[in-house]
Amino acid sequence: MYQRALQGFEKAWGSDHTSTLDTVNNLGSLYKSQGKLDEAEKMYQRALQGKEKAWGLDHTSTLSTVNNLGLLYADQGKLDEAEKMYQRALQGYEKAWGPDHTSTLNTVNNLGLLYASQGKLDEAEKMYQRALQGKEKAWGIDHTSTLDTVNNLGILYNSQGKLDEAEKMYQRAMQGKEKAWGPDHTSTLATVTT
């Protein structure tokens, strides 16, 4: 369907039209979810170049593709490139929407995940704490996105040997997820096993 839409948009409006570029970005996301990471990167790069040209470097649609590239690079193990993309997206989101917007907070959480995978545990903790405070303020303490960050903190504290703090985070995440999704939901069970 994306290929069909892409061909139609390219024919009707050209390869640099914003609707064409949105479809290119969506195709990149599809390829990423299919594990076709090289194809995903090509689509994201094409979308990014077009969006930068059409809307500029700091437009929120451009930043969304920047963040997508960060996620892709993290999956590919290109951690330095992922960090650059996340930092760029974060600075742009903070400027466009402020420090507590959902896109900003999700990028902060992504940086926390990246820092944790790099072994930069203090930096990861700062990012998780910032994301948690913002999500609690924006969505409440029991929102599933908030609970995901709580779980991430539990994993981090466990890695740091802060076992009491880790247990508190795991318990909070598990209880919240049981309330939100039930005891047998895969997200609840993932927290139970960590």
Image (spheres, grey):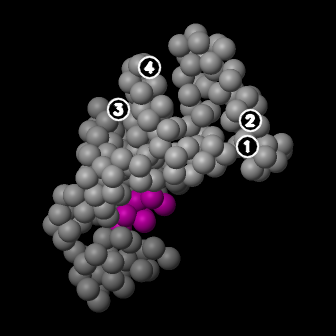
Could you classify mark 4 by the number of other residues whose Cα lies within 10 Å: few (under 14), some (14-19), or many (20 or more)? some
Q: Are marks 4 and 3 in contact (CB under 8 Å)?
A: no
- Image quadrant where residue 61 sits: bottom left
In the picture provided, is 18 more to the left or to the right than 155?
left
What residue is at 60 percent from the left and 48 percent from the top? 140
As helix, strand or loop, the secondary structure at mark 4 comes to helix
Q: CA distance from mark 2 to mark 3?
A: 30 Å
Q: CA distance from mark 2 to mark 1?
A: 5 Å
Q: Which residue is mark 3?
A: 79
Camera-near label (2 vs 3) is 2
Residues shaded magenta: 24-30
| The residue positioned farthest toward the bottom in the image shown | 12
Instruction: Give the amino acid type for the residue marked by disc 3 in the picture.
Output: Leu
Residue 41 visible? The answer is no
Q: Which residue is mark 4?
A: 121
Could you classify mark 1 by the number of other residues whose Cα lies within 10 Å: few (under 14), some (14-19), or many (20 or more)? many
Instruction: Give the amino acid type for the residue marked by disc 4 in the picture.
Output: Leu
Judge whether residue 27 is colored magenta. yes
Find residue 139 and report its horizontal and vertical position in percent. 57, 52
